[in-house]
Image (cartoon, rainbow, N blue to C red):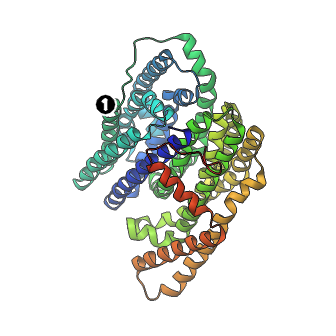
Amino acid sequence: MSLKQKAVKGVVWSVIQKLGGQTISFLVFFLLARLLDPTDFGLVAMASVYLAFLQVFVDQGFAEAIVQRKNLEREHLDTAFWISVGSSAILMGLTMVIAGPIAHKFKSPGLTSELTLVIRWLSVGFVFSALNSVQQALFRRNLAFKSLAMRSLLATLVGGTVGVTMAISGFGVWSLVGQQIVNGTVGIIVLWKASDWRPGFRVSASHFKDLFGFSASILGFNVLNFFNRRADDFLIGYFLGPAALGYYTVAYRILLMVTDLMRTLSKVALPAFAQLQEEPERLRRAYYKAIQLTSLIAIPTFCGLAALAPELLPSLFGTQWTDSIRIMQILAFIGIVHALNNISVNTIKAMGKPDWILKVNVVNAVLNVTAFVIVVKYGVWAVATAYVIRGYLIPLPTFILMARKLINTKISTYLRQCRTPILGSMATVAVMLGAKSVLEAWLDIYGLLVVCGVLGAVTYIGFIWLAEPPLFPQLVGLVKLATSKKKKKLDPQGLS
């Protein structure tokens, strides 16, 4: 099977995983948001800030190193596995001891003891992650996304069912805890059953050095990425309390669910790009194609969410989440940055330059923390605004320039991939807002959502069809290739 066929089939299974998983996750999230209050979500978000930081040190970047490394030996896998498992056990034990002091730092009157227990129970996730990391990396390396998709779907379904059942039974915040624990347990069972690899009882210092040469930069990137992505959660929880963090978390969670769908291309991009690292012309074409397809989906999706947020949040999750509307409208625009950056970042990783990403994230981390500390006193929406502005000023242009240096891309060609989706999205938002202003006196909130959503979709599809007709045959060709079992001639215009 050609690389293009593997990559496209990988995209197809990633889409199945994401669409199926996100559909289940959305239904579970929808039910839990209606059954629980903002404080419950805020408590779990507070615990997750601490746990997410330590989680970085469980994998230590080994998974990315396994995916990227050209020559891989069993000793590499065994070493990565046992170091990850050992690290997870140490971190879980540490968490059991210091969970109380950590909970006290958040200064949540009457909730400290409950937050302490939540942190301790969720720390079992360290072990889940360690047991899965090498297995997941091997499936990703081989573009075998079918097994990952099945694991994700089943774990999400079972975990979600347990969480909703507990919420209906009145378990409150523990519904969210139970959901995560069951999800992790099922994920381990499914993934290990699907994989033929089993770890040997050996750890090699030389093979550790091989992996760590690449993974050290990834580890540094992940540490800094934590501050880029989670400093806002920490400061909101610390200064504004669990309810404010709950509103922010729900708004961000909705955007994150959509962003995860956008990561479908980028998940396949790293192993596919890594196999093209010695063929710059093919890699350059693949990069442009990935940017085009990502922008085609991401830009209108996030713009549409911002336009329909006032109707979307209350209708789906209830009026108790009205305070999340403004936050979601602001954060929607960072979703576009994340989607596009994922492609550039994976190109940089595939070319063996993760240290470049590390340097960018040093700057990002400093600017993020500084900006959030300054604006948090003005409220949650101010933190969201600072997050978005920083995203457009620093990482987006920087990663574009890095890709340009590595594979000789042109900024004008990059921007051309985004031009039609941007113009189409502007037209779509204008139509939806116009329809809302005319129809809001005649339709209820649900009717507005349906009518504006349909009008927006028709407008965008029509605009793309008129502005860039060749794009549709290319998409049809990719679908045919994904479903074909015969080896076909590579398309020089597509991913090859």
Compared with 62, 119 (above or below) is below
Residue lying at 47% horizontally and 20% vertically, measured from the top left? 77
Question: Can I make out residue 381 in this image?
Answer: no
* Residue identifier under label 1: 193
Q: Amino acid at mark 1?
A: Lys
Position of residue 268 measured from the top left corner of the image (x, y, whole percent): 53, 42
Give percent across and percent down for residue 127. Answer: 39, 28
The answer to whether residue 132 is seen in the rendering is yes
Q: Quadrant of residue 281?
A: top right
Which quadrant: the C terminus? top right
Nearest the viewer among 339 and 330 is 339
Q: State the residue in front, 117 or 451.
A: 451
69 vs 313: above or below: above
Q: Say left or right for 73 vs 419.
A: left
Q: Residue 231, percent across and down?
A: 58, 44
Q: Is residue 448 left or right of residue 263?
A: left
Q: Residue at x 46, y 23 (%)?
A: 84
For disc 1, the neighbor class at 10 Å (few under 14, some 14 to 19, many from 20) is: few
